[in-house]
Image (cartoon, rainbow, N blue to C red):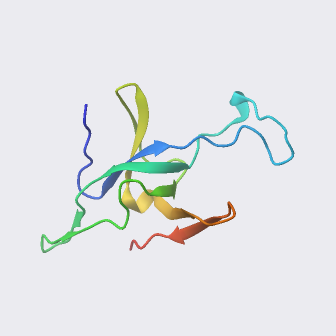
Amino acid sequence: MKLTPLHDRVLVRRLEEEEKTAGGIIIPDSAKEKPTKGEIVAVGKGARDESGKIHPLDVKAGDVVLFAKWGGTEVKVDGQELLILKETDILAIVEEKKGGKVKAAAGGCC
């Protein structure tokens, strides 16, 4: 099944968090929170303003993003759990930097 988000919504696949802390302690499943980092699978065409003009989204399929912990609607497509979010629920685009460090680029909404 193909799922295409409408308007200013995006379809996100959550990325799993590390199972160990930096000190090597293994985190049990019962103590884990749902990840707030994910990869965008699909995006809508954009939001319409009052005059009817479409404003494209600042994110695209393939972007890795950080999103609000309690935002979005969970859906299951072909056995895979995905999340439908409004673009405003996305907090930042994650850009991998050389040396394994992560740089977060702020979203350009509102």
**Of all residues shown, which one is farthest toward the right?**
23
How far across and down, in percent of the image, does residue 23 sit? Answer: 87, 46
How far across and down, in percent of the image, does residue 14 sit? Answer: 50, 43
On screen, residue 72 above or below 53? above
Query: Where is the C terminus found, in terms of image quarters?
Result: bottom left
Seen at 61% across and 66% down, the residue is 97
Seen at 36% across and 68% down, the residue is 58
The picture quadrant where one finds residue 75 is top left
Query: Where is the N terminus found, in terms of image quarters?
Result: top left
The picture quadrant where one finds residue 19 is top right
* Left or right: 67 in relation to 78: right
* Number of marks in the rendered image: 0
**Of all residues shown, which one is farthest toward the front?**
98
On screen, residue 94 above or below 37? below
How far across and down, in percent of the image, does residue 53 sit? Answer: 15, 72
- Viewer-proximal residue among 54 and 97: 97
**Of all residues shown, which one is farthest toward the top?**
79
How far across and down, in percent of the image, does residue 99 sit? Answer: 69, 64
Seen at 53% across and 70% down, the residue is 105
Seen at 25% across and 36% down, the residue is 2
The picture quadrant where one finds residue 44 is bottom left
- Viewer-proximal residue among 94 and 55: 94
